[in-house]
Amino acid sequence: MFKSTYSSIAIVAALLVSLSNCQSPKVEEKAPPEEPAFSYHKEQQRFKKASDGCRTDSNECAIIEIDFPQFREPAAVFQKINDSILHYIKTSLAPEDMGNVASLDDLGNRFIQDYNEYTAEAKTRAEEDNSDPFITPWNIETYGIVTFESPKLVSIELSTYSYTGGAHPNTTVTLLNYDTKTGKAISIKNLIKDQRKLVQLAEKKFRETHGLAPNASLNEEGFFWDGKFQLPENIGLSGEGIWFFYNSYEIAAYAVGPTEFVLSWEELGDLVDINKVK
């Protein structure tokens, strides 16, 4: 009896399969798998140092935190890139010549020493004036990431937030670009076939970003004190295209904040010498 039942089930299943095949259902088309993104071997390096007061009082505290990429191979070329990235980080912490020779640990100690002197002076003044000392925490944070990498080029973003007293904190972005064959820093402008056309496209996108009419005066709108559009100091690459970044104060008052936009690869068209990029 069991054999007969199983045989019937098998026959019905076969008929169903046959009917299903006759209907020839449409197979959903699938896009070909994306090629894996090109990537070098790299690791994020982290450095943190805090003043002793941070353990007991967050208002009397100085902290420095740094997180940045370092490449592991090919060592001969990427050591130059690593050294350059570290140089930019150190000079942002100590603009004077000390940044060229000191280690991160030395710079961290210097930062905390300056803060301790600042708090001591504030307390002394408060005692003399018979008032409460005005003490604020200090903070420096630098975070670096790779925004673009190919067999020929690599781009790095270094974003730094700092507050060491004053009316407001400062945030700056630095975009670095390197030739992976030599390890030397390069200018993105060197990848462009027609500089004049690049400026035209960038100004158009800048106006769109700020909602400005094509014929509006940039100076009257609060940008570019001489009234003439200029490319920013920081131009880098991203997966989307060429990234333009104007830091606060660069082209407008601090209250305006930074300006950034991307000209996509599609917008750039054949303006980019792609053989130098990929």
Image (spheres, helix red, strand yellow):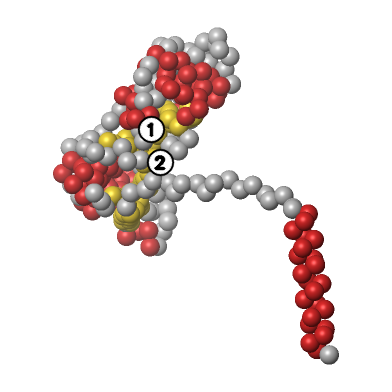
Choose top left, top right, bottom left or bottom right for residue 147: top left
Question: Quick one: SS at disc 2?
Answer: strand
Residue at x 24%, y 49% (from the top left corner): 74
Q: From the top left corner, tell me how far across and down residue 261 is, in percent.
A: 49, 29
**Most extreme residue toward the bottom, as rendered?**
1
Residue at x 32%, y 60% (from the top left corner): 52
Residue at x 79%, y 82% (from the top left corner): 6
Choose top left, top right, bottom left or bottom right for residue 86: top left
Above or below for 15 versus 73: below
Above or below for 16 versus 199: below
The answer to whether residue 165 of the structure is visible from this angle is: no
Q: CA distance from mark 1 to mark 2?
A: 8 Å
Q: Is residue 160 left or right of residue 213?
A: left
Q: Nearer the viewer, residue 104 or 165?
A: 104
Q: Is residue 115 left or right of residue 77?
A: right
Q: From the top left corner, tell me how far across and down residue 135 is, in percent.
A: 39, 47
Question: Quick one: SS at disc 1?
Answer: strand
Q: Residues within 10 Å of mark 1 (few under 14, many from 20)?
A: many
Amino acid type, mark 2: Thr
Number of numbered discs overlaid on the protein picture: 2
Quadrant in which the C terminus appears: top left
Quadrant in which the N terminus appears: bottom right
Choose top left, top right, bottom left or bottom right for residue 248: top left
Q: Nearer the viewer, residue 19 or 217?
A: 19
Above or below for 85 versus 60: above
Q: From the top left corner, tell me how far across and down residue 168 is, in percent.
A: 44, 37
Q: Nearer the viewer, residue 124 or 59?
A: 59
Q: Residues within 10 Å of mark 2 (few under 14, many from 20)?
A: some
What number is the disc on residue 147?
2
Q: Which residue is mark 1?
A: 236
Amino acid type, mark 1: Gly
- Whether residues under marks 1 and 2 lie with C-beta atoms below 8 angstroms apart, the answer is yes
